[in-house]
Image (tube, rainbow, N blue to C red):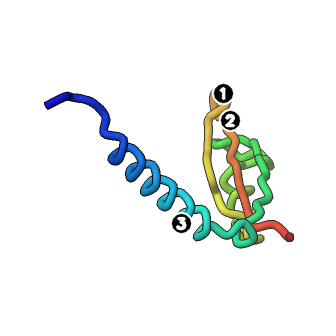
Amino acid sequence: MKNGIHFRSLVLGAMLGAAIVLSVAAAADPAARNQWEYKTIEGRVFGNEPTRLDEAINTHVADGWELVSAHPLADHFGFVVLRREGSQ
């Protein structure tokens, strides 16, 4: 018995793969995708300065923004990335 690729198995596998790809593509409706607005805010993480990051986050979350990510910048400073569903 030869060890090789059987042509019939190759064709059936390719047809099955194409059927899976097409069914996934048909299920993904491009009109149903969300359009997002993004915003970055930087500020002081600790201290009593007016640019406190936690207060800015709370204010924006109350306005409908969602926290995506937070990162430190230097010493006691950092920035956050916020998003909300945009208008279409």
Residue at figure coordinates x 76%, y 60% from the top left = 36
Between discs 2 and 3, the one toward the N terminus: 3
Is residue 31 visible from the viewing direction of this image?
yes
CA distance for labels 2 and 3 = 48 Å
Measured along the vertical axis of the image, is residue 70 above or below residue 82? above
User: Which mark, residue 83?
Assistant: none
Q: Residue at x 74, y 42 (%)?
A: 43
Please identify, in this view, whether the residue under mark 2 or under mark 3 is nearer the observer.
3
Q: Residues within 10 Å of mark 2 (few under 14, many from 20)?
A: some
Q: Is residue 32 above or below residue 5?
A: below
Check disc 1 and report the residue beneath it: 74
User: Secondary structure beneath disc 2?
Assistant: strand
Q: CA distance from mark 1 to mark 2?
A: 5 Å
Q: Are marks 1 and 3 in contact (CB under 8 Å)?
A: no
Tell which circle, 1 or 3, labels the residue nearer the N-terminal end: 3
State which quarter of the image contains the C terminus.
Answer: bottom right
Q: Position of residue 17 (x, y in %)?
A: 45, 53
Q: Is residue 59 visible?
A: no
Task: Report which quarter residue 30 is drawn in.
Answer: bottom right
10 Å crowding of disc 3: few (<14), some (14-19), many (20+):
few
Residue at the far left in the pictured view: 1
Left or right relative to 16: residue 4? left
Q: Position of residue 79 (x, y in %)?
A: 70, 41
Q: Residue at x 70, y 72 (%)?
A: 32
Check whether the beta carbons of the residues at disc 1 and disc 2 lie within 8 A of each other. Answer: yes
Q: Which residue is mark 2?
A: 77
**Residue that carries the numbered disc 3 in the rendered image:** 23
Residues marked 2 and 3 touching at CB (< 8 Å): no
**Residue 70 percent across, percent down from the top left:** 61, 45
Total marks drawn? Answer: 3
**Element at label 1:** loop
